[in-house]
Amino acid sequence: MMQITERDTRGAAVEAEMREPVLATHDVGVRYDETKVALSGVNLEFAAGEVTSLIGPSGCGKSTFLRCLNLMNREIPHCHIDGEIVYDGHNINTPDENLYELRQSIGMVFQIPNPFRKSIRDNITFAPRCHGIKDKKRLDEIVETSLVKAALWDEVKDKLDKSAYALSGGQRQRLCIARTLAMNPKVVLMDEPCSALDPIATFSIEDTIGQIAGEGISVIIVTHNIEQAARISDKTAYFLLGEVVEWGDTDAVFSDPKDKRTQDYLTGRFG
């Protein structure tokens, strides 16, 4: 009997291979001061409803690549991003790209939960208000919908006006996810979102990732946890020394890696 995994149950991810990628990179590289190369020749595609894990040893370029995808590296002095980053049909790696609008569609969740020093409600409504949404009924709908998607609504629905800092670490991270979802992004980037959390909170975040991918959102996550990548992702890319060594369906990468360097990393003989 064929085993049905959690990933198989997500309707949005089942036929992801048949879709055009919502985000793709073509020969993307990162240089500092014109001489130090941190990343080179990265070609990856990300489909709606898929979870993609970026794995590899520390310093291999995973987080650098992730920050390229919503042009966060552009804020680093003397950092140059080469190649094309194609989102929604156009190359966003241009000086004219509107970062304010781009980051509505490509949201980011960081390693350490960073809620605002505001109420839970105000954390969710901050960005929608900045973008002109003032109607209270509409804002209330955004609060509830975002918290439901982040699997946090039932835990906080009776204390929306309490400080976000009263939440546990895992709840804070799910609040940060909900805050990102409030802008209806097509892509959510996550940089080791579970590294500071205990196993129970990690399970909650992993479940949340599956739920938001089921909403048709492309989730791209950097993780050092090999077991986590195997559990939650549809695709996996293995980075080493600033290059992608191997990329493909997670089950294939883990069960039958094509490159010995990938096999060595997955079996603990390297990295």
Image (cartoon, rainbow, N blue to C red):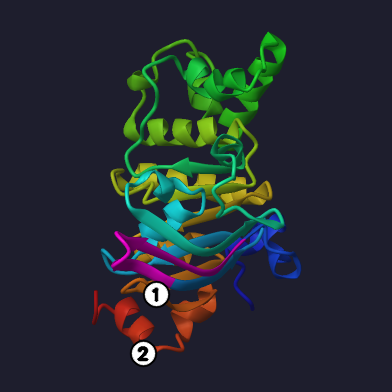
Residue 140's image quarter?
A: top right
Mark linked to residue 12: none
Tell me if 128 is positioned left or right of 58 in this view.
Answer: right
Where are the magenta residues, as a range? 24-40
Q: Nearer the viewer, residue 99 or 115?
A: 99
**Residue 178 visible somewhere in the drawing:** yes
Query: For mark 1, what is the residue?
Result: 243
Residue at horizontal 60 percent and vertical 52 percent from the top: 92
Q: Could you classify mark 2 by the number of other residues whose Cα lies within 10 Å: few (under 14), some (14-19), or many (20 or more)?
A: few
- The x and y percentages for residue 183 are 62, 32
Secondary structure at badge 2 equals helix
Establish if 211 lies above or below 60: above
The type of residue carrying mark 1 is Glu
Circle on res. 260 = 2
Residue 258: x and y, percent? 46, 89
Q: Position of residue 1 (x, y in %)?
A: 64, 78
**Label 1 Cα neighbours within 10 Å, binned few <14 / some 14-19 / many ≥20:** many
The answer to whether residue 3 is magenta is no
Q: Earlier in the sequence, mark 2 or mark 1?
A: 1
Q: Of discs 2 and 1, which sits in the foreground?
A: 1
**Above or below for 128 versus 169:** above
Q: Amino acid at mark 2?
A: Lys
Please give the name of the residue rendered at 34% of the width and 69% of the height, measured from the top-left corner. 56
The secondary structure that most of the magenta stretch takes on is strand
> Is residue 151 visible to us here?
no
Q: Is residue 39 magenta?
A: yes
Q: CA distance from mark 2 to mark 1?
A: 15 Å
The answer to which image quadrant residue 65 occupies is bottom left
Is there a contact, CB below 8 Å, between mark 2 and mark 1? no
> Residue at 32% of width from left, 68% of height from top?
37
| Percent coordinates x, y for residue 178 in the rendering | 53, 33
For the residue labelled by badge 1, is the local secondary structure a helix, a strand or a loop? Answer: strand
